[in-house]
Image (spheres, rainbow, N blue to C red):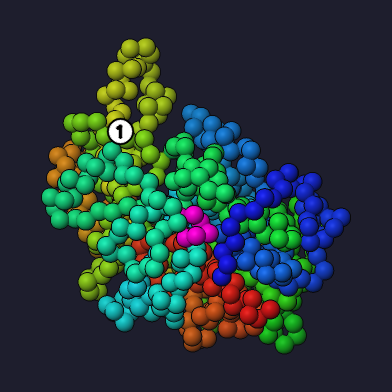
Amino acid sequence: MSSQGGADVDRTPADSRRSSSEPGRTEFDRTPSDRVDVCIVGAGPSGALIAAELSAAGHDVVVLDAGPRFDPADREDEMENHLRPGNREPLWGMGGERDAYTSSGDRHYPLNATRVKGIGGSTLHWQGMVMRLHEQDFELDSAVGLGADWPISYDDLRPYYAAAEEAFSVAGASDNPFSPPREEPHPLPAFPPSYSDSLFAEACESLGITTHSVPNARNSEATDEAGACVGYGTCKPVCPSGAKYDATRHVDVAVANGARVLDRVPVQRLEHDDSGERVTTAVYARPDGEEHRQEAREFVLAAGGVETPRLLLLSESEQYPDGLANSSGLVGRYFMDHLFAGVGGTLDQRTRQKHVGFNTTESHQFYDRPDDSRTAIKLEFLNYAGPAPADVAMGSDNFGDDLLNEIRSAYGNHVAMGALVEQLPRKENRVRLDRSRTDDHGNPVPDVVWRLDEDTRRTIRRANEIQRSVLEELGAEITWTVGPEDTGPAFHHMGTTRMGTDPSESVVDPQLCTHDLANLTVAGSSVFVTGGAMNPTLTIAALSLKAADHLRDRL
């Protein structure tokens, strides 16, 4: 659990960069390596951390990712394209036949809205908030009779959480009275509260609501890996300065350690030995469509809560007619997300909206569930309420002084609160294959079957009540509410290969190895048993470091 930090690495273009593990090769060479120790599918936070850890221990590692390698030098241009009025091109190239999907549940699930295929994965455009799950999250059924219990406890994950915070250079004040216990403060100091946070603080104090800082995976001060945040404010979808963590940091560490990282090589299927007990090969396609076979001693699936179960289902065989590692029939089941609840309005005073592109204050006072009457709520005080000046200007027909007056009247007095609300694991929410539609390689696309239950709706209503009380205490004119009927997902794909000790009730064991195949590890949010209401990436990282330890032991 060394959680490798930064390193001086070669940042020349991928097509000319040589792999130190195999002299004479370049990253453009997408032919397979000789049989390696570990083959990792996915170069997001899970795959990158595991690759960095195992390559640092001297193991031969190959990482295969379906998407391209994006050049960090392009990020300022990407920010400009994002801000340019009328630009509707997806910033990270999502969409089209490669990323086709269906959504046949009661509610449409907009899968491509925020996912990224490419080196770095979703961390290329995430907001960067990183919290630990609470102790209650791991024992939800035992504590209040909701959901299910994890086969591991918070204490089991506690050292890995600390290592993950170090790996991400997390900035935080360790001032949350509702958070689970910790040994050390956060690695970097917290970002100061925004001006609008101070307005909310007064109202919350009057109502007896405790507020605290938000831990962020962005540099509040310079480190060896990156400079301090300079306040571009476009954290989602792009951080031009590199101050916000993304998984390319650990991809670079892995490459410096000798790992090979291949981009644009979507894995088509996994194959196993005659006994059906071990995976032998990852079959992947190059950009020209030619297929290759990568052999390894150990395999790691780190492709997220949708593509991981899809690949397992695509890897059906005579021994596994319902999909690889699916003797339980639960691959793809128990898909979860967090739901958004929000209330916003205007004040008769300046709020300095959009001066900060991320959250600096939250409240977890309503997170733990007192009984089974509701699920978890994480309250957020939004620094990016209302329109930006450019939004007002570009949507106006006025010019000169008239335009200036319009901007002054529309900008600067907005406030809003958000919340993440927990969705409990339900078997009917799932990812399955839609065999009536195929991707650019002729494979069935994922079908997200998703619906809301009454527990979630009831919790959203409760979150809205709290939010309205705060805005009313502020004296705000409430102009909008996002409640149960118009809520949407936070795009935190969880569940689908749940962890457990009973092979008939789970897909992976507490060491993140599948019950059915002795050398197949699944890392990432798909192994979550419950989702809580915390942004999941820190838990993803902690679980990945745990998985790396177990892999190291087996190797």
Q: Which residue is mark 1?
A: 352
Residue drawn 39% across the image and 68% down it: 183
Residue drawn 37% across the image and 27% down it: 389
> Up-down: is 310 above or below 460?
below
Dot 1 amino acid type? Arg
Whether residue 527 sits left or right of residue 325 in the image: it is left
Q: Position of residue 336 (x, y in %)?
A: 43, 65
> Up-down: is 551 above or below 347?
below
In the rendered image, the quadrant that contains the C terminus is bottom right
**Residue 363 seen anywhere in this rendered image of the structure:** yes
Q: Position of residue 92 (x, y in %)?
A: 58, 45
**Residue 110 seen anywhere in this rendered image of the structure:** no
Residue drawn 49% across the image and 54% down it: 169
**Number of marks present in the image shown:** 1
> Up-down: is 497 above or below 355?
below
Is residue 169 located in the magenta-colored stretch of the structure? yes
Residue drawn 18% across the image and 50% down it: 204
Question: Residue placed farthest to the right in the image?
Answer: 24
Which of 383/375 is in front?
Answer: 383
- Label 1, secondary structure: give it: loop
Query: How would you rate the neighbour count of disc 1 (Cα within 10 Å): few for under 14, some for 14-19, many for 20 or more?
Result: some
Quarter where residue 267 is shown:
bottom right
In the rendered image, the quadrant that contains the N terminus is bottom right
Is residue 504 located in the magenta-colored stretch of the structure? no
Which segment is the magenta one? 165-170
Which of 104/541 is in front?
Answer: 541
Which of 297/267 is in front?
Answer: 297
Whether residue 327 sits left or right of residue 177 in the image: it is right
Quarter where residue 312 is shown:
bottom right
Q: Position of residue 439 (x, y in %)?
A: 65, 56
